């Protein structure tokens, strides 16, 4: 990993922020692999088994999706998985996802990677911001990503969520002022959205990713992780050459019903992102 890609700690307090559990996943002298899975899909036991498989396959950080009926930032693979989880008898939502995170940490013990919940604002508000934050802390969750919570509306959550990192998303269309605001509000890392639209697998990386990463590096000392559209180990390796972290979601969720397939795919991603070996591994095919 090039020197300029290392997490840079400034004298303005960013060093203290970067000491969080999330940021620790980036401080290993290599890019971090962040793997997204949908909680409760295709059923709670298989969901847990696939989470363990992803961790054992080499994920440095787990992004755990909270099933929600109106996932505006998600493409068809993740949205369909959320619908399946929500439709289960008794439902599967934020509370159940927090419980699942606690089970994952218990199953993996000290070797558990940090867990970040990807949720929408409505489930947080239904449970209550303070109650949600308290439950997350009790489960050992490290932070949250809330794609429909703009910086301007985040003050109540930030006030309630001490001890948890909050990751904001930067888009290709973000203005310089916007990047500064979300970078200042973020902790843990900044999520760089590689392309406009929803999550999903794509044949190639979007143009402009390198430029957006550079723009973010100019305004923050936090790690910059790139997601949306990364589908293969070769694409993941390409992103690892320019960012501090690589986020892979839909391609993992598509395999989530088969924990062995999850393990094989995440292992291939980890080898590509972490740079072990001169040749990029081939991506195992989903069933």
Image (cartoon, helix red, strand yellow):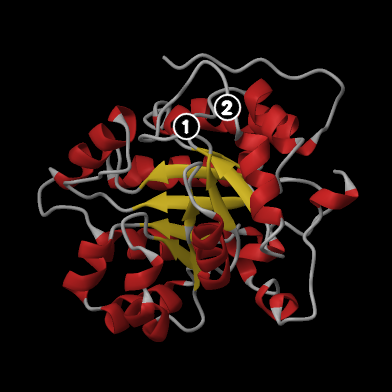
Q: State the CA–CA distance, disc 1 to disc 2.
A: 7 Å
Query: What residue do we see at 42% from left, 28% from top?
Result: 258
x then y, percent, for residue 153: 32, 72
x then y, percent, for residue 181: 51, 67
- Crowding at dot 1, Cα within 10 Å, few <14 / some 14-19 / many 20+, comes out as many
The residue lying toward the viewer, choosing from 131 and 73, is 73
Q: Do the residues labelled 1 and 2 touch (CB within 8 Å)?
A: yes
Quarter of the view holding residue 119: bottom left
Looking at the rendered structure, the secondary structure element under dot 2 is helix
Comes first in the chain, label 1 or label 2: 1
Query: What residue do we see at 10% from left, 48% from top?
Result: 89
x then y, percent, for residue 174: 48, 50
Label for residue 252? 1
Query: What residue do we see at 36% from left, 54% from top?
Result: 147
Q: Would you place residue 82 above or below residue 215 in this image?
A: above
Label for residue 132? none
Q: Name the residue under label 2.
A: 265
The residue lying toward the viewer, choosing from 14 and 1, is 14
Q: Would you place residue 260 above or below residue 182 in this image?
A: above
Q: In the rendered view, does 87 fall on the left or right side of 234?
A: left
Query: What residue do we see at 31% from left, 53% from top?
Result: 66
């Amino acid at each position: 990993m090039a020197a300029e890609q290392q997490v840079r700690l400034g004298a303005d307090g960013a060093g203290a922020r970067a000491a969080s559990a999330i940021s620790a996943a980036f401080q290993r002298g290599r890019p971090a692999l962040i793997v997204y899975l949908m909680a409760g899909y295709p059923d709670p036991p298989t969901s847990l088994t696939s989470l363990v498989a992803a961790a054992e396959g080499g994920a440095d950080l787990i992004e755990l999706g909270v099933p929600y009926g109106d996932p505006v930032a998600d493409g068809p693979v993740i949205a369909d998985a959320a619908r399946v989880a929500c439709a289960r008898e008794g439902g599967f939502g934020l509370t159940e996802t927090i419980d699942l995170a606690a089970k994952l940490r218990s199953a993996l013990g000290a070797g558990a990677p940090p867990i970040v919940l990807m949720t929408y604002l409505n489930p947080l508000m239904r449970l209550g911001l303070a109650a949600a934050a308290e439950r997350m802390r009790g489960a050992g969750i490290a932070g949250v990503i809330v794609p429909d919570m703009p910086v301007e509306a985040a003050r109540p959550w930030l006030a309630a969520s001490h001890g948890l990192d909050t990751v904001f998303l930067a888009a290709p269309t973000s203005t310089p002022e916007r990047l500064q605001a979300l970078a200042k509000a973020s902790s843990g890392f900044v999520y760089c959205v590689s392309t406009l639209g929803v999550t999903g697998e794509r044949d190639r990386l979007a143009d402009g990713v390198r430029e957006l990463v550079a723009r973010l590096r100019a305004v923050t000392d936090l790690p910059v992780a790139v997601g949306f559209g990364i589908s293969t180990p070769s694409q993941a390796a390409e992103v690892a050459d320019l960012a501090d972290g690589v986020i892979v979601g839909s391609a993992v969720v598509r395999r989530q019903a088969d924990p062995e397939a999850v393990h094989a795919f995440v292992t291939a991603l980890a080898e590509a992102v972490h740079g072990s070996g001169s040749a990029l591994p081939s991506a195992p095919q989903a069933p």
